[in-house]
Image (spheres, grey):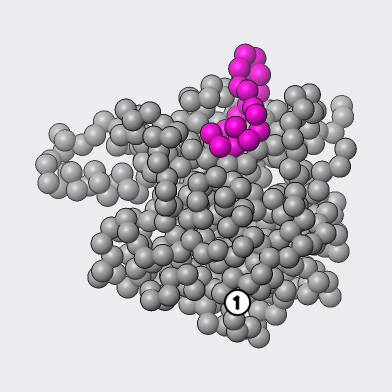
Amino acid sequence: MEERRVVITGIGLISPLGVGTEENWKGMLSGKSGIGPITRFDATDYPVRIAGEVRGFDPLEFIEKRELRKMDLFSQYALAATELAIRDAELKIEGVDAERIGVLVGSGIGGILFIEWQHSVLLEKGPRKISPFFIPGLIVNMAAGLISIRYGAKGPNSATCTACSTGAHAIGDSYEIILRGDADVMIAGGTEGAVAPLAVAGFASMRALSTRNEEPTKASRPFEKDRDGFVIGEGAGILILEELSHALKRNAKIYAEVVGYGMSADAYHISAPPEDGDGAYRAMKMALDKAKVSPEEVSYINAHGTATPAGDVAETVAIKRLFGDQARRVAVSSTKSMIGHLLGAAGGVEAAATVLSIRDQKVHPTINYDTPDPACDLDYVPNKSRELSIDYAISNSFGFGGTNACLVFKRYEE
């Protein structure tokens, strides 16, 4: 049996930089920040008053009005990004083929807005006034369920929930589902709509968030000396993964090929990485080993790069351990510098940015990089995008609980 290959044929992006893939990519290449004051709720008394909110999103462009009351914002973003990805891929889901098309879309937190809303209903009006859509609306797998229902995708259906690694795990798991022959196409990625009072207060109480409230666009500063935490963001990143012969048969455009996937656990701490970045190192090494790609062949790393003091150092140490003398030759940049940390959606959006880098042979910058940190001494593509010859690139995602994912993408060749 001929070895199966998996390619990316569609991308749908919704982030603080806008609604639409090319709009997002243009913003990333220009080093635009999508961070601003929180408008979703009154954050006056919060220690953190900034976030990466999605602006200009009209769910009625994607979802019927009567359906909206049944779903939390994270599901709305997922459906909208999926519509964009399916349009981009010019994918038709019908007939027997529908049984070979699956969905694996996850979320780190799920329907927290639904939980807050219905809890207030419970307190104010009592248990009989709780919406019958409350439970279906909040559960993490509902985004994947709604996508399959809308498009008639009858193949494998699942959802990852691995904190900040969610989107990357969804893509990696989908890649392996196609490799083993259980599907020919997978709609995969992550979604999050957690710019909510409880979530912002919770992350702030962990001291995980930047408090640079007076300079929102400068708050997310990955790998930079004066970084003080991440900025919470929201949105969705959905990719269409497709078995190569299936894609070629319908003359689909091909962005890049997926060639490796690694995952690991830190087994160390609920929210902090080990100082030596061991889990990140092992995830990257596994991904490259499975891809049969040497570190010397990798030109670009889309870093997890959250702008937390410990996390950025640990990722830098892991890269240096794996790449050795080649570490400073590799371009490393953080999408989060512009859009903040999209939690469960981060891996989907950042995998898309990596794939677009391969398509255009350009990498976006790490913005707000003013003062180098001696402990972070790699090439972080500071402040300005760069043309770069890329045959192989990797995308890193690391999450609370010590869960790690790494994806390897390759420039497509027949």
Split into 4 quadrants, where in the image is the C terminus?
Answer: top right
Residue at 42 percent across and 56 percent down: it is 53
Q: Tell me if residue 351 comes above or below residue 305 in the rendering.
A: above
State the quadrant of the N terminus.
top right
Q: Is residue 28 left or right of residue 132?
A: right
Q: Where is residue 412 drawn, in percent x and y?
A: 82, 43
Q: Which residues are magenta?
A: 83-105
The one of 368 and 133 positioned closer to us in this rendering: 368
Name, please, the residue furthest toward the left.
125
Q: Nearer the viewer, residue 275 or 105?
A: 105
- Badge 1 crowding class, 10 Å Cα cut-off, few under 14, some 14 to 19, many 20 or more, is many
Residue 98 appears left or right of 324 = left
Residue hosting label 1: 369
The image quarter in which residue 206 lies: bottom left
Q: As rendered, which of 132 and 230 lies closer to the eye? A: 230
Q: Amino acid at mark 1?
A: Tyr
Q: Is residue 222 above or below residue 234?
A: below
Q: Can residue 318 be spotted in the picture? A: no
Residue at 60% x, 25% y: name it: 155
> Looking at the picture, how far across and down is residue 229, in whole percent?
48, 72
Relative placement, left or right, of 333 versus 135 is right
Q: Is residue 236 above or below residue 381?
A: above
Judged from the image, the secondary structure of the residue bearing numbered disc 1 is loop
State the image coordinates of residue 209 (x, y, percent, origin top left): 43, 70
Residue 213 percent across, percent down from the top left: 38, 74
Q: Is residue 96 magenta?
A: yes
Q: Give the residue drawn at x 24%, y 34%.
A: 131
